[in-house]
Amino acid sequence: MGGPLVAITELSTSSSITALYYPSPKNGTPGIQLLHHFCTNWDAIFRMPGRDELVSLSQSNSLIRNTILAITACHLRHVSPGILQHRIAEHFYQSLAIQDFQTALETPGKSLGQQGVNALLLAALLLNMIAFTLPHQDNGVEEDPKSSWVFSVREDGLGWLALQAGLRPLLISLSAYLDKTVAFLDPVMFGHGKAGWREIRKFQSLGIVPESWIRAFKLKNDSFSCESNASTSNAEDQNDADVFGPATIALAYLRSIHPPRSTILLNWVFLTKIHGDLKALLYDRDERALWLLGYWLGLMCRYEGIWWCERRVRRDYEAVRMRLHELHLGERAGVDGLYWRDMMQELEHAPVLVLT
C-alpha cells in the first residue's frame, strides 16, 4: 500500500526531539513535508487550542498520528487541488487511520483503557473533517446544489454521513468512560477552563426548544422513553419525540451559540442524534428529517472560512432549501401549512441567525 518505513525527526511543541517511524506513501507527499505543513499551519488546519495534547498523544498512538497526517494531507489537497501527490497521501493516511480506528472499535473498553478511549473518540471527531470535505472536480460541479445528495438517486449519496452517524452507538458503548473523556476533550477542542461538551450534556429536555418546533414535530412529551401502556395515537406521538426530540434539543442549543470559529466542533453533537429511524427518514428524503439537517447546515454556514466544511454546508443547505420549497409545504391545508410556513422562515434565517 505504501513505500518503506521512514524515520521523521519532529520538533514537538514541548521542544523535545522525537523520532517517529511510520509508513511513507508511495508517490505521495512525503511525511516530512506533511509534518512541516502541520507545524506551520496548525491554526489554519485545526482551529482548536489543544496542539500540545494532540502532538503528545500522536507520539504514542498510531490512530491519532495517522489521523493528523490524513487531515494535514487533506488540507494540502484543499489549498493545492491540482497536486496529485497530496491526494495520494490523504487517501494513504486516511486508510491507515481507518484501519487503526476499526481495530480500536473491536477492542473491549477495558483493554483500551481511558487513554485508548480518549484517542478513539478524539479520532472519531477529527476524521469527520475529512469525511465532510467535498471532492475536487475541475469543472466545479461539486458546488452546484443539484449535485448534492439531496437530489441524488444514488444509494451512497449520504455515504459521508456514515462515520458521523456512528458516533452515537460509539458513545453509548463507551458510556462508562465518557465523563473522563469529556474532561479530556474540552481543553483540547475549546481551551482550558471552557466547558464545551460538558455544557451540552446538561440539556436533556424540550425546555430550550422553540414552541413552533414542538408543534411542527409533535413533541408533546418531555421524556423520550416509550410508555408501555400508550394508546396507538399516543404511541405515534411518543415515537415522534423519540425520533426528533434529541435532535431538536441539540439544534436549539447550537442556535444559541455565538459562532467564533473555535466552537465549530461543538456542532458535531447534532450528528450524534442521527440514528435509527431518523437516519432512515433522511435516506427517504422525509421533509421533517431534511428540515432538521438543513437547519443544522444553515447554522454551520455561520462559521465562515472553515476550509473543510464551508463548501459542503453551503451547497447542501441550499439543496435542502430548494427541495423543501419544491414540496410547497406551506400550502398544505390546515395547521400543517401554518406550521411549515413558520419552519421555512426559520430555515431561511439559519445562516445569519444571531440570538441576543
Image: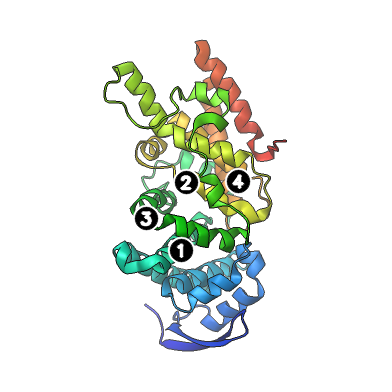
Please, is residue 289 above or below residue 103 in the view?
A: above
Residue on which the image places disc 4: 300
Disc ID at residue 176: 3
User: Do the residues under discs 4 and 2 have CB atoms within 8 angstroms?
Assistant: no
Identify which residue, 27 or 128, lies in the foreground: 128
Residue drawn where x is 47% and y is 46% of the image = 271
Residue drawn where x is 58% and y is 66% of the image = 75
Mark 1 or 4, closer to the camera: 1
Name the secondary structure under disc 1: helix
Quadrant of res 112: bottom left
Locate residue 229, reporting x and y percent.
Answer: 27, 21
| Mark 1 residue type | Ala
Mark 4 or 3, closer to the camera: 3
- Side of 16 relative to 61 (left or right): right
Locate residue 70, reporting x and y percent.
Answer: 49, 69
User: Do the residues under discs 1 and 4 have CB atoms within 8 angstroms?
Assistant: no
| Mark 3 residue type | Ala
Locate residue 150, reporting x and y percent.
Answer: 48, 39
Whichever of labels 1 and 3 marks the residue nearer the N terminus, that label is 1
Please, is residue 324 above or below residue 198 in the view?
A: above
Residue on which the image places disc 2: 271
- Side of 314 relative to 104 (left or right): right
Hey, which residue is sitting farthest left in the picture?
A: 228
Residue drawn where x is 62% and y is 55% of the image = 194
